[in-house]
Image (cartoon, grey):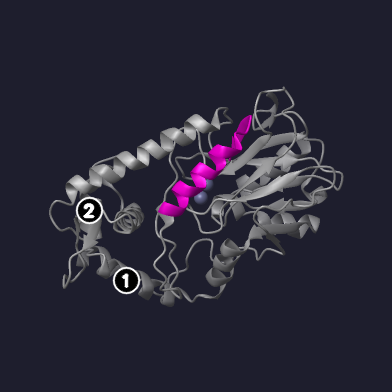
Amino acid sequence: MTQLMPQVGDHGGGVRSIRVPIPDNPLGFTLVYVVDTDGGPVLVDTGWDDPESWDTLAEGLRACGTSATEVHGVVITHHHPDHHGLSGKVREVSGAWIAMHAADAAIVRRTRETRPERWFSYMTAKLEAAGAPESHVAPLRTARDRKLPGFSPAVPDREIVPGELLGLAGRRLRAIWTPGHTPGHVCLHLEESHPAQLPGNGRLFSGDHLLPEITPHIGLYEDPDDATVTDPLGDYLDSLERVGRLTPAEVLPAHQHVFTDAASRVRELLAHHEERLTDLLTLLVEPLTPWQLAERMEWNRPWDQIPYGSRTIAVSEAEAHLRRLVKLGRAEAVAGSEPVTYVAV
Ligand SMILES: [Zn+2]
Ligand SMILES: [Zn+2]
């Protein structure tokens, strides 16, 4: 890879990346990929909606010999604001289309339509059911008029259909549906030989699904209007196996750095989750609510140092693990418990 400017890398074969900063976030930046097509540059993700991030994206596009106004299309791996944040602005200046999987497009529409008070009352009920203490739930009851960040994401104009080519002139880019991190997360498989002839099948834009050194957050698919019992962790593990079987020559993730040997990274992640599920079973020798489980799980710091918002995310992750264990028949809800507790079987 050659550097065109500090934020821009050239991956060969008409693919560049721009490191678009994410303000106040330990992840640091989103890698926005610029894919040359015969119809003009197409972006994979756009980055966080912030003036500095926008300037970096615009400047990066100029370093690539094009500009934000020239963008032909935007392909979104998933709806999170560090990926989809600037899509609206790119469309505004260029007239580009925005493509997204239907399940994440539904979240975008719902986010735009849901009144904050509906969202806060849903979260209040959910956290109470998970056994959260009153000290954690109380702030939500008084926060109903608060504005939520990323509350007006851009509605996409095209649907990404799993298994199909995206129809980019002169390129073969196929959508691989990889639910788990979000219900409509997609990876994009560039079915072209590797520009440096690395062995394997093309290159994979992996979004947040497959990252070289971190594991993506897997929580519940929070949807106030849907009572379906989903299994996001099960979806994620299936999706991991699916991308492992593609054996891409190189993976181009949305954070950190590009890497090779996707299959061994997939094996590492599968082993990590299996180990984590096994550890949880040892905690579930006594009945625990999702909250109590989250308190006892291993995080990147002790529970009492985890900030408020991250605790909510941690509980969602604990619940996703419980769903998986219940589905596998390795844990069950204790009949009559309120809030519901779970125990290993
Ligand atoms: Zn994400
Ligand atoms: Zn991300």
342 vs 11, left or right, is left
Q: Return the residue found at the far left.
A: 286
Residue 50 in view, yes or no: no
| Residue 124 disc label | 1
> Does the magenta stretch mainly form a helix, a strand or a loop?
helix
In the image shown, does 29 or 295 lie closer to the viewer?
295
Q: Position of residue 158 (x, y in %)?
A: 72, 62
Q: How many marks?
A: 2
- What's the amino acid at mark 1? Thr
In the image shown, does 320 or 344 lie closer to the viewer?
344
Question: Residue 320 falls in which quadrant of the image?
Answer: bottom left
Q: Earlier in the sequence, mark 2 or mark 1?
A: 1
Quadrant housing the C terminus: bottom left
| Residue 293 disc label | 2
* Range covered by the magenta-colored residues: 234-253
Spatial separation of the CA atoms under disc 2 and disc 1: 19 Å
- What's the amino acid at mark 2? Leu
Of tags 2 and 1, the one toward the viewer is 2
Label 1: state its secondary structure. Answer: helix
How packed is label 1: few (under 14 Cα within 10 Å), some, or many (20 or more)? some
Residue at image location 47% in from the left, 45% down from the top:
24
Residue at image location 16% in from the left, 70% down from the top:
337
